[in-house]
Amino acid sequence: MTKNSTGLPPAARPTDRPSPRAGILEIAPYVPGKSKATGGTKVFKLSSNETPLGPSPAAIAAFQDAASSLEIYPDGAATALREAIGEAYGINPARIIAGAGSDDVLYMIGHTYLGPGDEAIHSLHGFNVYPIIIQAAGATPVAAPEKGFTTYVDAILDRVSEKTRVVFVANPNNPTGTYLPFSEIRRLHAALPPHVLLVLDAAYADYVRRNDYESGIELAGAAPNVIMTRTFSKIFGLAGLRLGWGYGPAEVIDALNRVRSPFNVSIPAAAAGVAAVKDKAHIEAAVAHNEEWLPRVTQAIEGLGLEVTPSVGNFVLIHFPATPGRTAAEADAFLMGRGIILRRVTSYHLPDALRMTIGSAEANEAVIAGLKAFLHGAAS
Ligand SMILES: *Cc1c(COP(=O)(O)O)cnc(C)c1O
């Protein structure tokens, strides 16, 4: 049968209204973390891995300064931002691409390297934006199973076919919080065919304190088929501004720049990013807060009899039993009634778990007390 540019036989497209091209309506829309509680006098939003410390005061000041020139188009190449990032991370600014969030960079990767007939691999409990991006580009997502809620290199390699064009790996992964030692990333890369682009999503890299972890800067600097993405949404506290970046081979960055929306990073976002990346003390404070609370929260919740997947990020995945009265859905509703918003992760194929962002001391204590009341009765 002849097909039009949409990939659908002409007869299948209704002529009485615009219809999206093939596959678009099969995309399961992204489910963001909730932002409204059902009860509680004070609300603790721990559903989107935002930082309790907020952004650097210098970033807020830079954002406010930018208010005086809003009628001016931004520098489309985001030169000052790329230079500041290059300096902070010791990398060549010419090989950096900036985006409106790292999601923007990930979408550019999808539109540049994927099309109908192609496949891209992501892990089963990997970041949910990957399958959306893959399908939006008209390609087919292939989910690789995990081992112990951790990306499983052999399962990814087993699924590489002639059609594979991209492999997405979040390291550490969201929502599981687990990570792969860099030896495993190198093993994955070494076994991939050279035409497959390996995307290392290092959204939480700044939080990780493990000797065997690397974000991928060196590999993305050396290999012709690796790109690393980073975000200002998490440890930098600029999620509302939408700012992220990618670092990779000159050829890949050049191709992405052809697809990039011309003024994708706004002046206030770039200005705040420049200030944020320079404020090392603020980042250290965020790491120190997480280093204190990640183990405390993990141990306290385990002490209540729940399983917590060991995390290296600023969030934990909490597993609930399927027993009526104790399920993840019921815990979520209970906590919501106390003003505590965690993240349901059913869309990540984890219906029996909730993800909790490490929040302020007060928020973390509220979750621990809330879970205790849920499991063992409010009196205890
Ligand atoms: C939060 C997150 C991002 C960041 O997305 P932005 O578009 O930069 O806000 C990217 N990848 C993962 C795995 C994340 O959890």
Image (cartoon, rainbow, N blue to C red):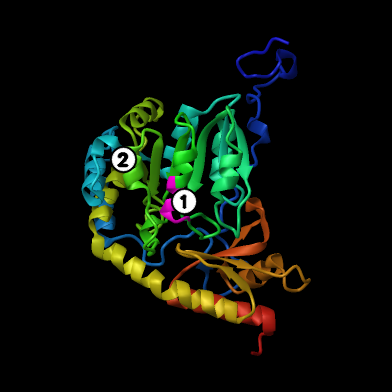
Judging from the image, what secondary structure is the residue with disc 1 in?
Answer: helix
Quote the CA–CA distance across marks 2 and 1: 18 Å
Predominant SS along the magenta part: helix
State the image quarter where residue 70 is shown: top left
Q: Which mark is residue 184?
A: 1
- Residue lying farthest top? 2
Along the line of sight, the residue nearer the viewer: 152 or 298: 152
- Amino acid found under the numbered disc labelled 2: Gly
Decide: marks 2, 1 in contact (CB < 8 A)?
no
**Is residue 246 toward the left or the right of residue 116 in the image?**
left
Residue at x 52%, y 70% (from the top left corner): 43
Is the residue at mark 2 in contact range of ligand 1, meaning its CB lies under 8 Å from it? no
Q: State which tag comes first along the sequence, 2 or 1.
A: 1
- Residue lying farthest bottom? 380
Q: Nearer the viewer, mark 2 or mark 1?
A: 1
Residue at x 55%, y 75% (from the top left corner): 367
Q: Position of residue 282 (x, y in %)?
A: 28, 64
Along the line of sight, the residue nearer the viewer: 57 or 152: 152
Location of mark 2 (residue): 221
